[in-house]
Image (cartoon, grey):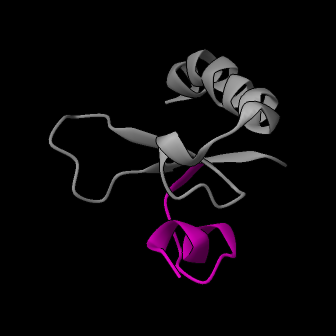
Amino acid sequence: MTVFQKIARQEIPPGFVSYAVYVLAVEDNAAQAPVHILIVPRRVIPRLDATSRDDAALLGRMLQSAPAIAEKA
């Protein structure tokens, strides 16, 4: 199980910035910049090249959530 899966299951307490049905955004605990937020799908996608056409809506939600998450941060 990856650290992202553990965060999504709330087994690891993250610095949640946003928590939605399909995606979550957490603060990077090893950030190299003043603000670094990771937006990840709640469904496991091991690599970007492992996506299919069925993942298009989920990937779109991730991208569309970025401006609101950035504004909130």
Q: Residue at x 76, y 31 (%)?
A: 53
- Residue 21, how many percent across, how many down? 84, 49
Q: Residue 68 is drawn in which quadrant?
A: top right
Was residue 9 drawn as part of the magenta stretch in this picture? Answer: yes
Q: Residue 10 is drawn in which quadrant?
A: bottom right
Q: Is residue 39 visible?
A: no
- Residue 19, how many percent across, how many down? 72, 50
Q: Residue at x 31, y 34 (%)?
A: 35
Q: How many marks?
A: 0
Q: Is residue 57 above or below residue 26?
A: above
Q: Which residues are magenta?
A: 1-20
Q: Is residue 32 visible?
A: yes
Q: Residue at x 53, y 75 (%)?
A: 13
Q: Is residue 31 above or below residue 56?
A: below
- Residue 58, how many percent across, how many down? 76, 35
- Residue 37, how many percent across, how many down? 42, 40
Nearer-the-camera pick, 40 or 17: 40
In the image, taking residue 50 as reference, residue 35 lies left or right, namely left
Q: Residue at x 68, y 18 (%)?
A: 64
Was residue 58 drawn as part of the magenta stretch in this picture? Answer: no
Identity of the residue furthest to the left in this view: 32
